[in-house]
Image: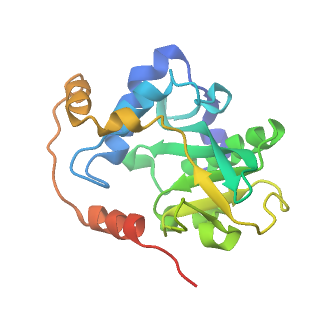
Amino acid sequence: MNKNDYIIRKETEKDYREVENLAREAFWNLSKPGCFEHYFIHIMREHKDFVPELDYVIETDGKIAGCVMYCRAKLRDEQGNEKDILTMGPLCVLPEYQRKGLGKALLEHTFAIAAEMGYDVVINFGNPDNYVARGYKSCKKYNVCFEGDFFPAALLVKVLKEDALDGRKWFYHPSDVDAPCDDEKAVEEFDKLFPPKEKGWQPSQEEFYIHSHSSING
């Protein structure tokens, strides 16, 4: 999609429900029956780790077609040294506008701002097929893992500066911003505020399960 066909701007309070519904449409039945991403966005905005400077939407055809948000996180090495980084997500694009370059535009726009803010590492937990074209690489290539030396296939690292990571082992410590999403009752209650949608199974759920539960060795 040509740059003249869309506008990237900060999210405003009047956009909140439209953006939440966008996330619901983008993620419904994608990684599980139903989804929680709309609730995640709802609670994220009030969390201490939320980064409002990187909260952007993209408009086209007179409506919001995509959004991206970030939270603060940390890397900690084996000596206890810490590094402030970002976790990206969710990145949402309405199904009818996917594969048109809108997600790419949002990422490139916010990566540049993040770098100006002094951040040089962005981490995302998702399907590699959707992110390697944007410069994300396997966590294993940067020696970044969860505690216990677990290198998930879905843990992806984007460096905003070439020398951001020096090869030492870093343990990824994400924000606890998504903890309330484990409350299925709270998610269900919030979902009632939106038009009814049918939960169901689709192959992408198995694909996400495989990526999120697989580790990279060697």
- Residue at the spot x=39%, y=37% of the render? 179
> Residue lying farthest bottom?
218
Placement of 150 over or under 88, stated as above or below: below
Placement of 15 over or under 66, stated as above or below: above
Question: In the rendered view, does 17 fall on the left or right side of 116?
Answer: left
The front one of 198 and 146 is 146
- Residue at the spot x=23%, y=36% of the render? 184
Residue 13: x %, y % from top left = 51, 15
The colour scheme used to paint the residues is rainbow
The front one of 206 and 212 is 212
Q: Write down the quadrant of residue 88 in the picture.
A: top right
Placement of 113 over or under 19, stated as above or below: below
Tell me if I can see residue 22 in this picture: no
Tell me if I can see residue 211 in this picture: yes
Residue 80: x %, y % from top left = 72, 51
The front one of 198 and 210 is 210
Residue 21: x %, y % from top left = 35, 31
> Residue lying farthest front?
79
